[in-house]
């Protein structure tokens, strides 16, 4: 009996027909009428509405047979699969996840409205990437068992390129100055690499924020971006940007005050005020000041301090008074430190880097230092330290350390090429975090035309609980020194082992002590450089032309590394001193001293000025001369560019080859000044940089004559997918006829 003809009756049973995937219990849970209740026309309409609203059905009917209520449904088809064709700009799995969030996913019910919405959202995403010509068409294909397949057919089209960028309203700063602050450009000769002429909504948003910061940092407190107009050409390949701004007046800080609860530390807080009375207003300096005050209060246990700047603007005088209202909040101490995410790394490996201890006052400086130390371990891609209130204890917090581990083991097979060694092959098995203990072990070898090395090493950063490290290695080295032309048998072989301990005495300083044993074998003929022949003749064995000797050195060193990066440093300094002494226990009695100082200073837009200075000095004691195999060599990349590697310093004339051949020296001096800047058009890309340099240095024999060789030039460095690549072109300044000039030098290749 149809619903329209049904009279009111008491429902004795409910029967559902037409279900395929939906469970009957699901239908009953949505029905507003149950067995034993009285059915009415209103109840019937309400039931149909309730079942439609679930989204499971495309048709619902309700009938009655006697006192039995019959619910007849036709289910919506389910989505069997979702496919994308022509999608290159986005990762398909990422898109699938985003569609799932809005209800479009495999095994879910098909809803045309949701598919249309997904289609429009994909178009919007392409527009945000500058692909205005992108076309997205969703095709729905029925398949067996009441299912459908969804195909998103995409024609991405070309990315719209920026044709012109215009500013309206700028009077203080020129258009070229403002354009120089932006990532987006109208294109240049390097745009194929930097892609800075391809429009992106995200990049434009970032550029507008950069322009705003540029004005606010120069006193224009009331600067406003009035509007941004993005116009596209009819063919959807060109973009025109018009940015309208109001600069306002340039404001000077008249008064800078502290207010609120200062905890008796007003004098200390005033010392960190980066913005003072008489200065031009700067939002960056204001942010720096509030951050510094919060860090000071945090170091005294006030983890939740807030600093609220309150400006008082006097437009007629172009002056502003700034009052920093300080609210330190409550002082808290740490109840416990929780570490999560370290599935492999043992808890103690992370915990021993913590400088914030449990049951002590919260200290923001120690929190920051702890995060830096954990990050320097190299075992984690992410490190996050946060605080959480302890319920019921307003003066306590928990410190939560969340890490995300990365693979720390590697089997590497590598190849490289340099202007000196030619082809270099290398291989290695390394584990930086063996068994999650923080201990590093490795087996590595390299094979080149000049040098061959095989090394087995182990490093334990916490050999003792108080942080003393231990490094041990066992190695074999074979070297055919440079310029051995005419003497293929000339070779130096070394077999040795070292053990070294590092003792930290501050957070950035460490001293090292070690010893070892080295066994040298020198093979020489009548064509070998005369100094080597003489050394072998004076101290060699009964085997003609061969010297076998051994050394038992003692080493000591100190290092302080304050650079922000070991690969691409931009600020900070590196200082180190080391000494090596050959003891009378072995055949060699000598000492070598080495010192190095590096300093980096970063300017805006990725410009870096760096200085490197190295001094090495060696001397013999006892009856034997300084061992020639311990000589320093100077020249080439990493030393004095423009001269062939290792070619500077003492040399002799080889009558067979007709060339001057270097023998190295007991001492050396090297100085380098380098100015690094981004490649024009690449923004502040640190992986591709140009540099200019001035180098000076030399190696010296027993009698030091402080005459240095100098050079200058330019170069290109690139952190390529295959490893660091460096080209330099050096011009010697005061080269002598005995020097070996090599203007173009390069080096490329690491393990891949």
Image (cartoon, rainbow, N blue to C red):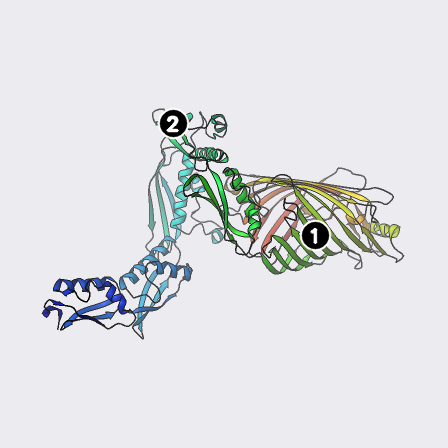
| Residue 571, above or below 49 | above
Label at residue 320: 2
Label at residue 472: 1
Query: Toward which corner of the image does residue 441 lie, by quadrant?
Result: bottom right
Does residue 663 show up? no
* Quadrant of image for the C terminus: bottom right
Tell me what residue is drawn at x 54 percent, y 49 percent.
688
**Callout 2: 10 Å neighbours few (<14), some, many (20+)?**
many
| Residue 660, above or below 45 | above
Query: Toward which corner of the image does residue 290 lie, by quadrant?
Result: top left
* Quadrant of image for the N terminus: bottom left
Query: Toward which corner of the image does residue 316 lie, by quadrant?
Result: top left
Front position in the image: 536 or 69: 69
| Residue 36, above or below 407 | below
- Relative image position of residue 655 (x, y in whole percent): 83, 53
- Relative image position of residue 393 (x, y in whole percent): 43, 40
Q: Residue furthest right?
A: 542
Single out the mark in the foreground, 1 or 2. 1
> On the picture, is 68 further left or further right than 370?
left
> On the picture, is 651 further left or further right than 231?
right
Label at residue 642: none
Front position in the image: 726 or 349: 349
Tell me what residue is drawn at x 19 percent, y 64 percent.
33
> On the picture, is 579 further left or further right than 70?
right
Kindly state the secondary structure of the residue where label 2 is placed: strand
Front position in the image: 485 or 412: 412
> On the picture, is 721 further left or further right than 306?
right
């Amino acid at each position: 009996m149809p619903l329209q003809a049904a009279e009111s009756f008491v429902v004795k049973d409910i029967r559902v027909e037409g279900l395929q995937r939906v469970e009957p219990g699901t239908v009953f849970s949505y029905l507003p009428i149950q067995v034993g209740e009285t059915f009415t026309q209103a109840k019937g309409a309400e039931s149909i509405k309730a079942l439609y609203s679930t989204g499971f059905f495309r048709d619902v009917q309700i009938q009655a047979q006697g006192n039995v209520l019959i619910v007849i449904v036709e289910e919506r088809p389910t989505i069997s699969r979702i496919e994308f064709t022509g999608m290159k700009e986005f990762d398909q799995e990422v898109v699938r996840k985003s569609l799932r969030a809005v209800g479009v996913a495999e095994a879910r019910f098909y809803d045309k409205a949701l598919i249309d919405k997904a289609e429009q959202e994909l178009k919007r995403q392409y527009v945000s990437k500058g692909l205005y010509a992108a076309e997205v068409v969703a095709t729905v294909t029925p398949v067996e068992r009441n299912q459908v397949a969804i195909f998103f057919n995409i024609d991405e089209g070309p990315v719209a390129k920026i044709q012109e960028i215009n500013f309206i309203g700028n009077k203080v700063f020129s258009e070229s100055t403002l354009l120089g602050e932006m990532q987006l450009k109208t294109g240049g000769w390097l745009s194929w690499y930097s892609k800075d002429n391809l429009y992106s909504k995200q990049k434009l948003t970032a550029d507008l924020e950069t322009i705003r910061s540029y004005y606010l940092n120069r006193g224009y407190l009331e600067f406003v971006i009035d509007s941004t107009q993005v116009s596209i050409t009819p063919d959807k390949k060109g973009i025109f940007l018009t940015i309208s701004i109001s600069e306002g007046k340039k404001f000077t800080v008249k008064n800078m005050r502290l207010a609120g609860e200062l905890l008796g530390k007003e004098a200390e807080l005033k010392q960190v005020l980066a913005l003072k009375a008489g200065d031009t207003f700067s939002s960056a300096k204001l942010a720096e000041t509030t951050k510094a005050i919060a860090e000071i209060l945090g170091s005294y246990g006030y983890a939740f301090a807030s600093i609220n700047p309150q400006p008082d603007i006097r437009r007629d005088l172009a002056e502003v008074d700034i009052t920093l209202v300080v609210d330190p909040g409550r002082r808290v101490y740490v109840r416990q430190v929780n570490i999560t995410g370290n599935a492999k790394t043992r808890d103690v490996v992370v915990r021993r880097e913590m400088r914030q201890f449990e049951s002590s006052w919260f200290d923001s400086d120690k929190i920051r230092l702890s995060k830096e130390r954990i990050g320097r371990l190299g075992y984690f891609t992410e490190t996050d330290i946060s605080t959480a209130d302890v319920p019921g204890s307003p003066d306590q917090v928990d410190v939560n350390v969340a890490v995300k581990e990365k693979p720390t083991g590697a089997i590497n097979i590598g190849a490289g090429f340099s202007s000196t060694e030619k082809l270099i092959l290398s291989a290695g098995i390394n584990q930086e975090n063996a068994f999650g203990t923080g201990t590093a072990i490795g087996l590595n070898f390299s094979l080149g035309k000049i040098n061959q090395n095989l090394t087995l090493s182990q490093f334990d950063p916490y050999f003792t609980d108080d942080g003393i490290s231990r490094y041990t290695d066992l190695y074999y080295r074979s070297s055919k020194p440079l310029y051995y032309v005419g003497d293929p048998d000339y070779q130096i072989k070394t077999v040795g082992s070292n053990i070294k301990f590092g003792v930290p005495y501050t957070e950035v300083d460490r001293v090292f002590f070690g010893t070892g044993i080295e066994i040298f074998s020198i093979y020489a003929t009548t064509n070998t450089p005369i100094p080597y022949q003489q050394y072998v003749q004076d101290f060699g064995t009964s085997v003609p032309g061969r010297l076998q000797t051994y050394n038992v050195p003692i080493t000591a060193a100190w290092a302080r590394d304050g650079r922000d990066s070991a690969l691409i440093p931009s600020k900070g300094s590196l200082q180190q001193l080391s000494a090596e002494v050959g003891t009378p226990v072995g055949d060699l009695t000598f000492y070598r001293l080495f010192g190095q100082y590096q300093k980096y200073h970063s300017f805006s837009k990725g410009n870096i000025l760096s200085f490197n200075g190295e001094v090495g000095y060696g001397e013999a004691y006892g009856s034997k001369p300084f061992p020639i195999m311990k000589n320093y060599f100077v020249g080439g990349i990493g030393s004095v560019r423009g001269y062939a590697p290792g070619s500077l310093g003492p040399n002799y004339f080889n009558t067979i080859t007709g060339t001057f051949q270097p023998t190295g020296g007991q001492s050396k001096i090297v100085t380098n000044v380098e100015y690094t800047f981004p490649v024009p058009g690449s923004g502040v890309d640190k992986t591709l940089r140009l540099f200019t340099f001035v180098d000076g240095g030399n190696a010296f024999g027993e009698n030091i004559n402080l005459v240095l060789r100098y050079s200058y030039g330019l170069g290109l460095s690139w952190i390529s997918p295959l490893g660091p690549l460096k080209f330099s072109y050096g011009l010697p300044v005061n080269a002598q006829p005995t020097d070996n000039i090599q203007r173009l030098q390069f080096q490329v290749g690491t393990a891949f």
